[in-house]
Image (tube, rainbow, N blue to C red):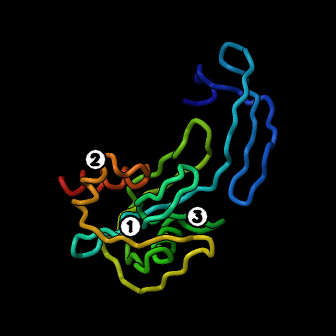
Amino acid sequence: MGENFPLLEKIIQKETLYNGSYLDLKKYQVELPDGRLADREIVRAPDAVAILPVKSNGDVVLVRQHRPAIDRTILEIPAGLVQKGEELESAVIRECEEETGYKPKCVQKFLTYAHAVGYSTGYVTLFLSDDLEHTGQVNRDSTEFLEIVHMQFSELQKLVEANKIVDSKTILSTLLYTKMREE
């Protein structure tokens, strides 16, 4: 699916609508495959990592936090942004320990996915760790308020199946780990 793919929308012009500390909003004018012009609004977001931390007793370590974009307090796996020049594995280990006080001794990559292909450039890489060390070294950002939640993985599965979890990274990680355990 290269440049000659017949569905390609050729970018004609780019305009910056907003530059923020976390994301930028761009407006692209594109030429459609039939020659007409159209506008596309693109959020330029940094890449992120997320991890399903599983303790030796089968509990998963989750976080509950309020997400203003959807105006809900939700349960999700620990996650955060990849800093410039940082390796994905280092970023996910750092984020897990900062948010939960559990440091993964080793991590296994599940997959990388584009979290909102219709309008965002951001990717999220999902990891698993079932080898955790409790350091208690929580070091959250000054604007990050969350609650640590421990529950059996089977309970998380039930929440996903009952559509009580709305976060894509948590849903995907739960389904991937379920499949891994069945193999």
Using the rendered view, name the quadrant where residue 30 is placed: top right
Q: Relative to 106, is 41 above or below?
A: above
Question: Where's residue 149, x and y in %?
Answer: 36, 70
Tag 2, which secondary structure?
A: loop
Label count reads 3
Q: Nearer the viewer, residue 158 or 170?
A: 158
Q: Which residue is mark 1?
A: 62
Judge the density around disc 2: few (<14), some (14-19), many (≥20) Cα neighbours within 10 Å.
few
* Amino acid under disc 1: Leu
Residue at image point 75% right, 33% down: 28
N-term mark: 1 or 3? 1
Residue at image point 71% right, 27% down: 10
Q: Nearer the viewer, residue 110 or 142?
A: 142
Tag 3, which secondary structure?
A: loop
Tell me: 170 left or right of 119. left
Tell me, yes or no, whether the two marked residues, 2 and 1, touch with CB atoms within 8 Å: no
| Distance from the alpha carbon under mark 2 to that under mark 1 | 17 Å
Q: Which mark is in front, 1 or 3?
A: 1
Q: Which residue is mark 2?
A: 162
N-term mark: 2 or 3? 3
| Distance from the alpha carbon under mark 1 to that under mark 3 | 19 Å
Question: Where's residue 89, x and y in %?
Answer: 48, 68
Tag 1, which secondary structure?
A: strand
Question: Where's residue 17, x and y in %?
Answer: 80, 43
Q: Nearer the viewer, residue 13 or 16?
A: 16
| Distance from the alpha carbon under mark 2 to that under mark 3 | 31 Å
Tell me, yes or no, whether the two marked residues, 2 and 3, touch with CB atoms within 8 Å: no
* Amino acid under disc 3: Val
